[in-house]
Image (spheres, rainbow, N blue to C red):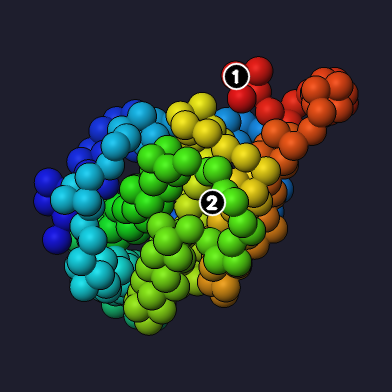
Amino acid sequence: AVLEKQSYILLSRSDVESLMCLDPANASLQNSFGQLDNDIPDAGIEVEIELSDLLLDMCPIKQENLIHDDQKLILLASLSDSLEYLADSVERLGESFISPSTISENKSDIHQSHHTRTTSAIPKSLASLANEYRRLATDCVRVLRLEMQLETIYHMQEMTKREYVEDQDAEDPDDFIISLTTQIARRDEEMAPYIAESKRNYVFGGISSVAANASIKALALMKSINLLGVQQICRNSIALEQALAAIPSIDSEAVQQRLDRVRTFYELLNLPFESLLGFIAEQEYIFSAKE
């Protein structure tokens, strides 16, 4: 399903794998039943931005390098679910070998030789097998997360190809945003039967940070923009926020925080110069010097 696709190739890179392991979102893979902490530490935000920058450096993203076929993505989600089940089953089998003996002490000689053999050999190999299945299950979900981030960049890179000089206030978001939000809703619905809510949060939870970073970087590459163009970009970010918030498992507060930053950034273009300087003095750490 994923061979030679960009998301799978990226996962095999040590720098990408290392950043994904450091990402606070990785906690949802370690604890499928737990809820993620909404308060992401500064170090976590830095990792998120670093990974986002690494993905944006790959622009332009080409459609043929994406999985694109929804059925293959469903296959990955289903495979992850099956591998998790298999890992749990193997672990239960291993535990059955080392469960406390109910055999009385006067019959323990035969039991002791049997018990020693199984705990030293079989459970160790079963544990190794269970770990391998769980690692593969995690890889499937990580490919899905990367794929959704690359799909987001593929759509968002359209921002740099158009002029945001509008002569009337448009009511709808840009076509590429409509296409992206439709795709997010469809894929979430199709994957829902196969992966737990916390894992769906993981798969779709990386979209907002990449979209926000791509939107802010796009300004430097835009040919032109006016007041109504700023409003159009703000409308795009609201539409994306609403689409992500509709996913039951998503951390909507984190999504809003990231996309609010985009709206604040573009609305700075509408400020008089003195007000802009005042904002920078008061809100020194909202944006980097480069931004």
Of callouts 1 and 2, which one flags the residue occurring earlier in the amino acid sequence? 2
Q: Is residue 278 left or right of residue 46?
A: right
Position of residue 218 measured from the top left corner of the image (x, y, whole percent)? 49, 35
Position of residue 285 measured from the top left corner of the image (x, y, whole percent)? 75, 26
- Three-letter residue code for mark 2: Ser
Task: Please tell me which residue is depicted at 42% across the width and 38% down the height of the picture.
Answer: 160
Q: CA distance from mark 1 to mark 2?
A: 21 Å
Task: Please tell me which residue is depicted at 68% across the width and 37% down the height of the picture.
Answer: 265
Position of residue 181 measured from the top left corner of the image (x, y, whole percent)? 46, 65
Position of residue 232 measured from the top left corner of the image (x, y, whole percent)? 59, 53
Q: Nearer the viewer, residue 39 or 182?
A: 182
Q: Which residue in the rendered view is the most extreme toward the front?
A: 167
Using the rendered view, name the quadrant where residue 161 is placed. top left
Where 193 falls versus 80 (above or below)? below
User: Does dot 1 land on a helix, a strand or a loop?
Assistant: loop
User: Is residue 248 among the parts visible in the rendering?
Assistant: yes
Where 239 falls versus 23 (above or below)? below
Residue 290 image label: 1
Q: Which residue in the rendered view is the most extreme toward the top?
A: 289
User: Is residue 145 among the parts visible in the rendering?
Assistant: no
Q: Is residue 211 left or right of residue 110?
A: right
Which residue is the site of mark 2? 208
